[in-house]
Image: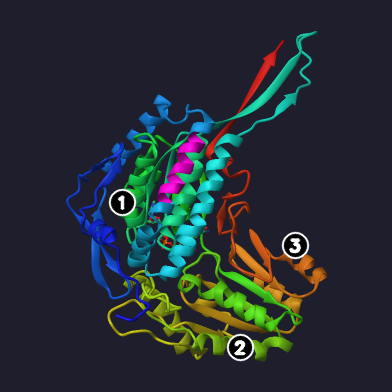
Amino acid sequence: MSQTQVTVLDSVRRFLDRRHGLYIGGAWQESDCADRLDIFNPADGQPLASSADASASDVDRAVTSAWQAFSAGVWANCLPAERERILLHFATLVEQHGEELAQLETLEQGKSIAISRAFELGCTLNWMRYAAGLSTKITGQTLDLSIPLPAGARYQAWTRKEPVGVVAGIVPWNFPLMIGMWKIMPALAAGCSIVIKPSETTPLTLLRIAELASEAGIPDGVLNVVTGRGSVCGAALVSHPRVAKISFTGSTATGKQIARGAADRLTRLTLELGGKNPALVLKDADPQQVIEGLMTGSFLNQGQVCAASSRIYIEAPLFDTLVSGFEQAVKGLKVGAGMDPAHHINPLVSRGHQQKVAEFLHDAQQRGAQLIAGDTGPDNGGYYIAPTLVVNPDPTLRLYREEVFGPVVSLIRVDDAEQGLALANDSDYGLTASVWTQSLAQAMEYTRRLQAGTVWVNSHTLIDANLPFGGLKQSGTGRDFGPDWLDAYCETKSVCVRF
Ligand code: NAD
């Protein structure tokens, strides 16, 4: 064991050794289905724990529990200040158990313990407290009307926001705790009940969260966690007739499938989907700032970030300088287990995903692409992929157009900013983008013309609870975060009074 390797807490070992069930109605319940889903440690490929493989009838129990809690008004009719107080207490409990949750996240997902502590915990707490505060800031409008009938009648109207009901939250594996909280917190702040389904690859942290929610005083049935396969448990959840709202984060392919089903029932829907995000580097950019910012933007969490920069368009005069700067930076990255914070790049989440990313690289190699690879990591059964730069890839390569979701980034030389902009916008996706320049005028010009839900200037991938986030084109519909975050979890009711 290296000197910097983190020691696993006893509480984490005990949690891993437990037989995990489904959290329904404020209690652990067994699944109807005897099968278990194995969870592996990506750092060495060894089994870590197992979770329940929920059936459609398990999901029905969970949704029924959520619906009964909602109908009884145990949470929706709480005073807003009481909901806020309980949700803030929930955040405090998550903070108190922060190291335990961070270690669980690194062990099941593979990411660096430093990232688990900073993002899955630190940032999540900011989002939790931000959403908790919105509980007491739900507002409508007063509206003057012009209805002329009957003669002499006068009207006053207003709108009020009411919780939609039962929310189905579907979570991917890249930031299991943080993205789970991006669904749980606005749903609860709005007064909804929720059934949440983590990814089958990374269910552990949300299972622990369910217990902390109960300890915080969130009433039984208001937050339920079901674990299982997307095709069974996930499909049953999003098609359940008592679900009023689906909040899905995951791949574009699954998002489209869910949207087709939701259309039949007109279920409310937010989709946070994939990205193939461009960075446009203009010739007056600061090279050091670009390298530092886009190394993080591209390789954070091994590139398993929906917002990651994966296509970097560089104006010709800076191209050679930046390619050699990125090469030096990539070759300086140490690859290894996430439980050692000295490692910059960690394993991918699963063997299946490792193989998928390796296929993208193999295809590029076969077609003669220029690849610059860093450290390949230990040969110990872990799911490692070397961080890789692809220099001037052929635009027909799969890795140039499709979302790789791995530590792979393309560097593309462009003659000028206009050519870079045209190539940047030539994508089915539109989640994020960045422009790198010292010129205010250029920054203003390209933030307007880049087609993305979020555009950064001289940074990339930095998100905040107060900044709306979501995609254009095939990157999704709807926005999370920001002052209007709860709108997606509320219906607007208009009230019209004759007097
Ligand atoms: P995925 O679509 O395979 O799975 C996401 C979740 O959906 C999992 O919990 C899965 O079990 C479930 N699921 C699968 N099929 C389902 C079905 N038919 N019905 C209901 N649920 C189903 O995605 P993934 O591989 O877990 O995550 C990676 C993807 O997530 C990437 O494309 C990434 O860009 C995207 N992502 C987007 C954002 C964003 O905010 N836009 C954030 C993180 C990740």
Could you tell me the amino acid type at mark 1? Thr
Q: Quadrant of the N terminus?
A: bottom left
Q: Place residue 243 in its image quadrant.
A: top left
Relative side of 379 to 489, left or right: left
User: What residue lies at 77% left-to-right and 75% top-to-bottom?
Assistant: 438
Residue 337 placement (x, y as % from top left) = 36, 76
Q: Secondary structure at mark 3?
A: helix
Q: Which residues are magenta?
A: 83-94
Looking at the image, do the residues carrying marks 3 and 2 touch, with CB atoms under 8 Å apart? no
Looking at the image, do the residues carrying marks 1 and 3 touch, with CB atoms under 8 Å apart? no
Q: Secondary structure at mark 2?
A: helix
For marks 1 and 2 on the same chain, the one whose residue lies earlier in the sequence: 1
Question: Is residue 421 at least partly visible in the picture?
Answer: yes
For marks 1 and 3 on the same chain, the one whose residue lies earlier in the sequence: 1
Residue underneath mark 1? 227
Residue underneath mark 3? 448
Residue underneath mark 2? 325
User: What residue lies at 29% left-to-right and 60% top-to-bottom?
Assistant: 12
User: What residue lies at 39% left-to-right and 74% top-to-bottom?
Assistant: 356
Residue 88 placement (x, y as % from top left) = 48, 43
Q: Secondary structure at mark 1?
A: loop
Q: Is residue 434 above or below residue 399?
A: above
